[in-house]
Image (tube, rainbow, N blue to C red):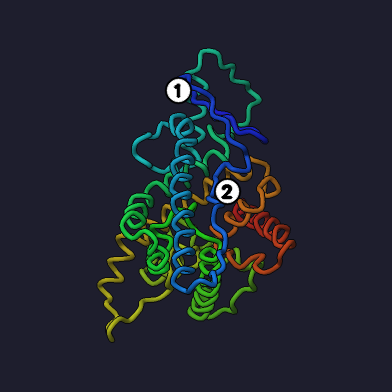
């Protein structure tokens, strides 16, 4: 049975014995910390820019190694979940699947004594293990194109990444300035999207961070709605949940290219939104199982809130942001339990 403890994280495979891997809990999903802002030296602008470019390159290389270490740490969990080690598939997005895996593990273990008082809502892995497996799989899939760009472009890589975005950049290779700009754009996009949706619904736009806004967002988190909604509605839902960078069809060269947008929604955005709906249902259950929002650290709390369309909650509040996000996530879980 896999286990996860505070302090040091002990990851063991329940399928076959192997050497125990010890990982500090605060580095469970590590990111590179080599990057530092470099002042431009007096010897010349070009030399200074080259020095900064080399610092970026060193940061990206360190981030690539962290992707490998995170994925290696997730291998015992992948074995427990019955996932391929060579193919970076994501863990199941179905909470009932995680519970059935635990039942199968207990019944197949000759030494397991299933207690009748055991919680039926427990899963085979905890949230920290699930998120490690989920995020490391995403980063491995991004790694191939990203590593190719770093190998080919070298010090010129920072010039290309702003145009390529986070779609091919592993989470361990994103600098703080990039994350800050992404969140600013996501906040503005969410604001425009919700106002556009409220205008179409002919209702007042809900207050940011309120319970009414949570209910407004939750209408997107229904599998039947995702399958039946029109393409424009799916675009707006993806924009609110940070799955898309636009909430409406864009005109290029004087034409709206409606066929292109319809194909984009059909082939990419609708399946992505459907996976995200199932993922959030699983993650909500895992947060409850772990003891609620109070058990999440500051970084995990921010990521959890942003994944639920509340990137603006706690923004610019400094030390008060963590408490505001905990309250918001608690409201979210209360509303989800009523649906």
Instruction: Tell me the residue at 55%/46% (across/down).
Output: 30
Locate residue 307, reporting x and y percent: 53, 57
Q: Which is more N-terminal, label 1 or label 2?
A: 1
Left or right placement of residue 60 versus residue 337 in this view: left
Give above or below for 46 relative to 32: below
Q: Residue at x 44, y 72 (%)?
A: 46
Query: In the rendering, at what x and y percent does residue 190 appear?
Result: 53, 71
Quarter of the image with the C terminus in it: bottom right
Using the image as rendered, state which of residue 335 and residue 191 is in the foreground.
191
Q: Position of residue 280 (x, y in %)?
A: 52, 51
Mark 2 falls on what kind of element? Answer: helix
Q: Are marks 2 and 1 in contact (CB under 8 Å)?
A: no
* Mark 2–mark 1 distance (CA, rounded to whole Å): 27 Å
What residue is rendered at 51% in x and 63% in y?
219
Q: Pointer 1: what residue?
A: 15
Q: Which residue is mark 2?
A: 284
Disc 2 versus disc 1: nearer the observer: 1
Q: Quick check: can you spot residue 121?
A: no
Residues 120 and 6: in front is 6
Q: Nearer the viewer, residue 56 or 124?
A: 56
Camera sees residue 229: yes
Residue 311 versus residue 105 in the image, above or below: below
Q: Quadrant of the N terminus?
A: top right
**Residue that extends furthest to the front in the rendered view of this protein:** 43
Q: Residue at x 60, y 64 (%)?
A: 214
Under circle 1, the secondary element is loop
């Amino acid at each position: 049975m896999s286990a996860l403890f505070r302090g040091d994280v002990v990851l063991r495979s329940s399928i076959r014995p192997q050497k125990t891997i010890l990982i500090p809990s605060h580095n469970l999903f590590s990111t590179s910390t080599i990057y530092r802002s470099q002042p431009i030296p007096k010897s010349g602008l070009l030399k200074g820019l080259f020095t900064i470019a080399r610092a970026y390159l060193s940061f990206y290389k360190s981030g690539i190694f962290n992707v490998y270490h995170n994925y290696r740490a997730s291998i015992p969990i992948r074995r427990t979940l019955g996932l391929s080690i060579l193919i970076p598939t994501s863990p199941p997005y179905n909470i009932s699947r995680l519970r059935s895996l635990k039942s199968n593990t207990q019944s197949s273990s000759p030494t397991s004594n299933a207690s009748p008082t055991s919680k039926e809502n427990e899963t085979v892995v905890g949230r920290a293990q699930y998120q490690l497996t989920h995020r490391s799989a995403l980063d491995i899939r991004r790694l191939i194109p990203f590593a190719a760009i770093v190998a080919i472009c070298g010090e010129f890589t920072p010039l290309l990444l702003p145009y390529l975005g986070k779609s091919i950049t592993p989470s361990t290779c994103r600098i703080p300035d990039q994350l800050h700009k992404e969140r600013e754009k996501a906040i503005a996009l969410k604001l425009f999207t919700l106002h556009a949706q409220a205008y179409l619904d002919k209702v007042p736009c809900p207050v940011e961070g309120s319970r009414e806004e949570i209910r407004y967002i939750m209408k997107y988190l229904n599998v039947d709605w995702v399958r039946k909604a029109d393409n424009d509605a799916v675009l707006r839902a993806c924009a609110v949940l940070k799955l898309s960078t636009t909430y409406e069809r864009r005109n290029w060269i004087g034409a709206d290219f409606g066929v292109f947008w319809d194909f984009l929604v059909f082939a990419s955005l609708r399946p992505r939104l459907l996976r995200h709906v199932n993922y959030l249902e699983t993650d909500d259950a895992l947060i409850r199982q772990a003891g609620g929002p109070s058990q999440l650290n500051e970084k995990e709390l921010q990521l959890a809130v942003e994944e639920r369309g509340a990137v603006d909650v706690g923004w610019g509040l400094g030390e008060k942001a963590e408490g505001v996000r905990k309250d918001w996530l608690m409201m979210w879980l209360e509303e989800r339990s009523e649906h």
